[in-house]
Image (spheres, helix red, strand yellow):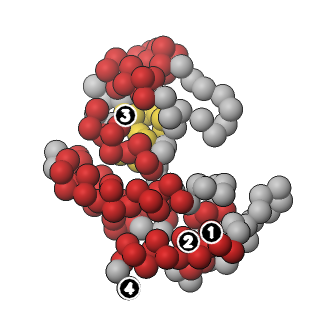
């Protein structure tokens, strides 16, 4: 979805079936019908991995294996716990974490990627909030929103 180029479900399934060295796909199309077609038709040893934090839990409920997460850079424990709960079949526990993280999952992309996660990580004092042109840092108001969401998440 972010590349402007899509690999169809049909092509993904053909690659998964025809080539033993194609083991997984990072599925970030945002197209749930396509995602379901891939999960439904995939070989047993082929993994579908969410490339979109907000769709991770719904995808895992359908059979995806996990996530290549952006938010996990700032909230690794929570994302890991949500994924592990889903892998164990504890979807009510995973759902509770998903909904705790939902506003933050959405907010880190509101003013572009990777600007949102970089701002969040700067607030955690992990990195400096530098981006290269043509990217721009998030606005001051959005920066404050991200920091407030983190405070609410950790109740500090």
The foreground one among 7 and 56 is: 56
**How far, Cα to Cα, is label 2 from label 1?**
5 Å
Q: Nearer the viewer, mark 4 or mark 3?
A: 4
Disc nearer the start of the sequence (3/2): 3
Marker disc for residue 90: none
Q: Which residue is mark 1?
A: 142
Work out whether residue 23 can be spotted.
no
Q: Give the foreground label among 4 and 2.
A: 2
Mark 4 and mark 3 lie on one chain; the one further toward the N terminus is 3
Q: Which mark is residue 47?
A: 3
Counting residues from the start of the chain, the first of labels 3 and 1 encountered is 3
Q: Nearer the viewer, residue 104 or 68?
A: 104
- Viewport quadrant of the N terminus: top right
What label does residue 145 carry, if any? 2
The local crowd at label 2, few if under 14, some if 14 to 19, many if 20 or more residues have their Cα within 10 Å, is some
Q: Secondary structure at mark 1?
A: helix
Q: Could you tell which of marks 4 and 2 lies nearer the N-terminus?
A: 2
Q: Which label sits in the foreground, 3 or 2?
A: 2
Q: Residues within 10 Å of mark 1 (few under 14, many from 20)?
A: some
Report x, y in % for residue 81.
28, 60
Q: As drawn, which residue projects farthest toward the right?
A: 133
- Kindly report the distance in space between the C-alpha atoms of the residues bearing marks 3 and 2: 35 Å
From the viewer's side, name the closer residue of 104 and 81.
104
Q: Is residue 123 above or below residue 78?
A: below
Disc 4: which residue: 156
Q: Residue at x 56, y 79 (%)?
A: 123
């Amino acid at each position: 979805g972010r590349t402007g180029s899509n690999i169809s479900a049909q092509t993904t399934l053909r690659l998964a079936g025809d080539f033993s060295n194609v083991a997984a796909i990072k599925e970030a199309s945002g197209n749930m019908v396509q995602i379901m077609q891939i999960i439904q038709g995939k070989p047993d040893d082929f993994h579908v991995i969410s490339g979109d934090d907000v769709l991770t839990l719904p995808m895992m409920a359908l059979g995806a294996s996990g996530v290549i997460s952006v938010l996990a850079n700032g909230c690794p424990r929570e994302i890991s716990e949500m994924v592990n709960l889903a892998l164990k079949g504890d979807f009510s526990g995973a759902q509770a974490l998903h909904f705790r993280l939902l506003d933050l999952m959405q907010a880190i992309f509101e003013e572009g990627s990777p600007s949102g996660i970089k701002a969040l990580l700067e607030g955690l004092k992990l990195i400096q909030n530098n981006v290269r042109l043509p990217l721009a840092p998030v606005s001051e108001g959005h920066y404050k929103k991200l920091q407030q969401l983190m405070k609410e998440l950790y109740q500090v």
